[in-house]
Amino acid sequence: MSTKLKNTVLVIMTALFLFGFSFCSILMPDHSESVSERRPLAKFPTVSKESVISGRFMTDFEKYTLDQFPMRDKFREVKSATALYVLGQKDNNGLYIRDGYASKLEPKMDVASVEHAASRFKFVYDRYIADKGMNVYLSVIPDKNYFMARGSAYPSMDYNKLFSAFRDKMHFAKYIDISHLLELSDYYRTDTHWRQEKILDVAGYIASEMGIDLSAEYTASRVDTPFYGVYYGQSALPLPADEMFYLENDILDACKVYDFESGSYIPMYDLAKTQGNDPYEMFLSGPKSLLTIENQQSSTDKELIVFRDSFGSTIAPLFCEAYSKVTLVDIRYISPVMLDRFISFDGSNNTDVLFLYSTSVLNNSVTIK
Amino acid sequence: MLFSSITFLYYFIPALIIFYFASPKRFKNCTLLLFSLFFYAWGEPKYLIFMLVSITQGYIFGILIEKYRKRKRAKVFLTASVLFSLLLLGYCKYVDFFISSFNAVTGLSVPLLRITLPIGISFYTFQILSYTVDVYRGNAPAQRNYINLAAYISMFPQLIAGPIVRYSDIAKQLDNRTHSIDDAALGIRRFVVGLSKKILIANILGELVDIFKSSDEKSVLFFWVYSAAYTLHIYFDFSGYSDMAIGLGRILGFHFSENFDYPYISTSITEFWRRWHISLGTWFRDYLYIPLGGNRVSKPRWFLNIFIVWMATGLWHGAAWNFVLWGIMFAVFLIIEKLWLLSLLKKSKVLSHIYVLFLVMISFVIFDASSISDAFSCIMSMFGSSGIPVVTFESIYYLKSYAITLIIAVICATPIPKRFAHTIQKNKWGVIAANIAEPIAVTMLLAVCTAFLIDGSFNPFLYFRF
């Protein structure tokens, strides 16, 4: 190939690339949402004299062109692969993969976040629980980094420091350490959460620490849809999908789940949500501020109130066999000030209260109200 | 508008190429001017007026200076133009610096004006200054065509980050330039190389610098990693922009001078400044150092001239005392080298390289510092004097994570890749292989750069842990 021909080919190839993507950007219809990032994409900004003079139109247009670029997710894959496998970076946008598991680096304990979470839990305790004779428990769920970073080059927060901080700050609750019962395979490879079918021992241990015996047996049913968790989209790498299971038995079949937000009964497992952006939402319908699970077959009048995050959606059904009612409260979506409008904190030793939170939420607790 | 943006690459450039090459020859400068004004207004619509006023005064004074050349009035018009340019630059860039310094010395609290610095003002001001001075000196004819002069001063490839293109260098090209496939190919290759330097090296090392700054587990090692990363970051950022400017200029038929020539292989600070930001160094030499008398004066005056030039160089980079200190540091070492060190440095190439790299790294720590005390604190920490650990787990992690990028950056900061390419092309089959590989490599680099730009919009829903 002569230099002249090379130059011609170079100009043609780069021109095709630039003009091709340019025309596609202009002509292709816009997308409303990024499934992989679970967020709405920028729309073409409104043009006005004010927005142009202030420069806002230009800033918004730049965001729009980035969000609506053709084959955006493919380009993100190219970037991730280049960063991790060509440039040898250990993580990409803070996400890393080890032994086939994806996770997000959480290198530091956020002291302010921990204090905020503990102070909100203390507020709940002081306002509704103190001196009511209820049994109060606390358990902290380690995230995947607890297992993935151990013995590796990846930095992770000092988990023992975080556990101790909550033990110290929540002296009113009996601490239930579950970290020794968990291992990496108890979590989804592509998602932040734990797997329901793998945490029966954890549920049993927490229950035993609360003086309850769990003995029910379950059948694990497989969800047909492949599960691509939150880290799948964020890592932008071709990770294999997870398989998702949910546990069933007669007791759970007979339980009724009441959603205070919609004022209606909802399914324990909403299989329609496995077709949505986040299939993990099939467990108790995802983010809900206030739910009760009523056990129709209960032979006791004991009740359990769980202050929880999303990890609670999978474990809470497993406590149902031992309680007549399990109330699930997520104070990220409801102000704790309003709780007594919906929950009766009568106070009796028939009620157990469990604060059950993952380290990832406790270390990023800005959303806790 | 940044070169390293989707808007520039996939909207601005295709539109420019279509309109520019569709324009008849006599309208090409007009097209270029309109696109350059749009390019500037995209980022700074408010400050377009400053640039237009500057261009207009340069145009008028240029013609007047030429009209009265070799007469007293020419000097008056030159002084007026220079004062106008410098006062505008001083108002926009330095007034708050002087007020805060005045407040610090006097204990008063004169309120700051808080003026936002118009992008590129340092570059276009220096271009206008060079134009009027060149016309005054008779090195270039005054430009009678307003559009041509405005197209030169506002030319978007070099508007925001240089190189500082002298009017005398491209006066003929403004009136008459040619376009060819070969020039376009060279320009595209140079542009993509610059884009890759910016996105694939400078931006990634910039991430490492940001990680260091936000870390609360700093160590001696981490300070050195930061210093090396920043030194490489600033080179690849700046020289990447220059490459992009030179490449874009070439596509449009202009031949801009080189701005960087592997400065980190220098064996003295004197040589470093012949290789670093060449257009700025030669500008200060020709328009400040030589008019002050250069080295053809007494020794004390010569040293004073060097100090003046380097203080001005420091201040040109930023309106803060750490930039002044940065300039003075180079002045001191340049004087020491001129007095006796240069002859000593010639005795050991290895030691002279270490000497230059060490000083340059220290200088860029000062350059990047938020204040002089911050600079000293950082330098002290590099030598472990602030009681920090030698290494931390975090510093090892990030060193490993960015090791390949750092190694690539070090290699690409030397002429090794260029020599390798030349070696390949000495062989017939090597030429064929290189000719086949080049278009593919350039297109792939463009694709990877695009991927990195798009990933810049990565913004996951923060509350995904519902």
Image: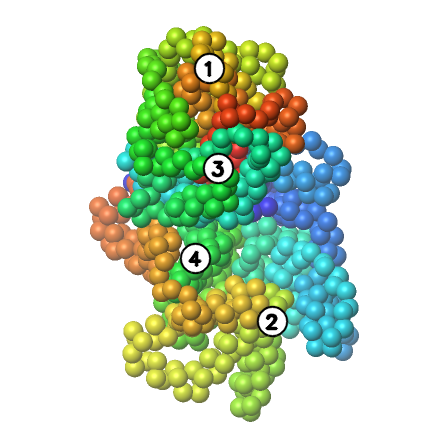
Question: Answer yes or no: do the residues labelled 1 and 3 have beta carbons within 8 Å?
Answer: no
Cα separation between marks 1 and 2: 76 Å
Q: Is residue B269 above or below residue B239?
A: below
Which of B255 and A259 lies nearest the eye of the viewer?
Answer: A259
Task: Determine the residue positioned at 29% across, 53% down.
Answer: B421
Q: Is residue B284 above or below residue B424?
A: below
Which of B414 and B403 lies nearest the eye of the viewer?
Answer: B403
Choose top left, top right, bottom left or bottom right for residue B231: bottom left
Q: Is residue A43 left or right of residue B145?
A: left
Residue A173's disc number? 3
Q: Are marks 1 and 3 on the same chain?
A: yes
Query: What kind of element bears circle 2?
Result: helix
Which residue bears the numbered disc 2?
Answer: B321
| Subunit under mark 3 | A
Mark closest to the chain's N terminus, 4 or 2: 4
Residue A300's disc number? 1
Tell me which amino acid carries mark 1: Thr
Query: What kind of element bears circle 4?
Result: loop
Q: Position of residue A214 (x, y in %)?
A: 36, 20
| Subunit under mark 1 | A
Tell me which amino acid carries mark 4: Glu
Within-10-Å neighbours for mark 1: few <14, some 14–19, many 20+: few
Tell me which amino acid carries mark 3: Ala
Which residue bears the numbered disc 4?
Answer: B217
Query: What kind of element bears circle 3?
Result: loop
Q: Position of residue A205 (x, y in %)?
A: 35, 28
Q: Position of residue B260 (x, y in %)?
A: 45, 62
Within-10-Å neighbours for mark 2: few <14, some 14–19, many 20+: some
